[in-house]
Structures are given as C-alpha cells and as structure tokens.
Amino acid sequence: MGYMANEIYFNPPNRHWDLKKCSFDNFEASPGAQEDALNFLKKFNARSPVGLYLHGPTGRGKSHLLVATARHLKDSDVQVSYCDGTTLWPNITQHSVGYKSDNHIVTADIVIVDDIDLTYNNQIGSNLFYRFILDLYDRGKPSLFSSNHSPEGLVKKLVVGKDRK
C-alpha cells in the first residue's frame, strides 16, 4: 500500500481512543526531559538523520507526543506511519521476507511506533522485531518509538524475553 502526500496510516488501539485530539498545542510539558522531547519533535522531519526513543512510566505523555508529531508531519505533507506495538506485530509477521518488510509501515517517510515493547513476546517475535529495526535502518527511515522500558530494559526484554531476569 502506498501513500499520497498528506496521508497518514493512523491505527491507534481502542485503549488510545482519545489520542486523535493530541497536538503540540495541548501538551503540557514539564521542564526538563518532556520539554526537550517536545522541542525536538517540533523540528523532526523526513530528513532528520536520527530518531528518538521516548521511555518512562505510564501517563507521562509519550503517546500524546508521538501522535502530535504524526499529526504535525501529516500537515507538512509527510507520509507518516503510526501504530502501536500490538498493531505492528501482525504487520511484521505477515509481510516479512528475509529481513525486509513490504508493508505500508516501512514504506512511509517516517515510522512511529508507540509502546514498542508490546510488539513481541517470544524468541520468534524478538527476531522479527530485530529484522524490522534493521529494515528501517537500511532504508534510512527516520523513526520514533516509545516504551515504558528504559533502553536497557527493552534490550533485556528483547534478548531474554518477557522481563525475565
């Protein structure tokens, strides 16, 4: 599936029914990390050479910021793919060939995956997740991710599985 300019693949799960109202204007950033993330995301675009991994406890505004970014980019004629870990999982399992994916998620200009830690729950899922990230890197896709896990916690979950010690 291809995208035309100004389109967005926006598939928030039911638990995020209120996210379509999110914008930069209605995000109340606390000084420090939230404010830094907000300022970074306001400048993020399809030519951004880096991505961002937002992490922290539930309710800190990670999803809000990612949806606001998707909406902002869409208004700037950027093709955006936004989904969460639960909707990413079926897509990467159904559309993977080797480590390349042929689905609409990786063909957008920018890929945004909220709650990335919900993507996988076993070794096969971990391998597919790794292939998905490698595919994005090989394509040079600017990407934004969020999770309740720190980067170290996410790697531990990815390698060890399901938060085991």
Image (cartoon, rainbow, N blue to C red):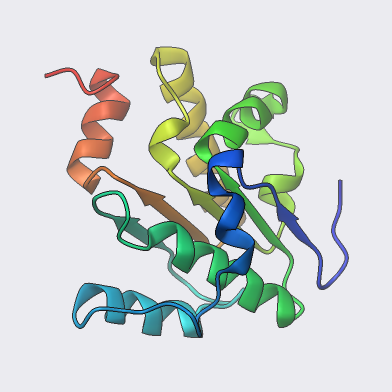
Q: Is residue 140 visible?
A: no
- Left or right: 152 in relation to 107: left
User: Which residue lies at the image location 49% right of the left edge and 42% below the top edge?
Assistant: 133
Where is residue 42 drawn, in percent x and y?
A: 49, 83
The residue positioned farthest toward the front in the image shown: 18
Q: Nearer the viewer, residue 127 or 163?
A: 163
Q: Quadrant of the C terminus?
A: top left
- Left or right: 57 in relation to 106: left
User: Which residue lies at the image location 71% right of the left edge and 57% below the top edge?
Assistant: 108
The image quarter in which residue 140 lies: bottom right
On screen, residue 163 above or below 5: above
Q: Nearer the viewer, residue 45 or 9?
A: 9
On screen, residue 7 above or below 38: above
The residue positioned farthest toward the left in the image shown: 165
Q: Quadrant of the N terminus?
A: top right
Where is residue 125 drawn, in percent x and y?
A: 47, 20
Q: Nearer the viewer, residue 53 or 17?
A: 17
User: Which residue lies at the image location 49% right of the left edge and 85% below the top edge?
Assistant: 43
Q: In this figure, what is the number of numbered marks?
A: 0
Q: Is residue 120 visible?
A: yes
Q: Nearer the viewer, residue 24 or 82?
A: 24
On screen, residue 36 above or below 2: below
User: Which residue lies at the image location 23% right of the left edge and 19% below the top edge?
Assistant: 160
The image quarter in which residue 102 lies: top right
Where is residue 126 drawn, in percent x and y?
A: 41, 24
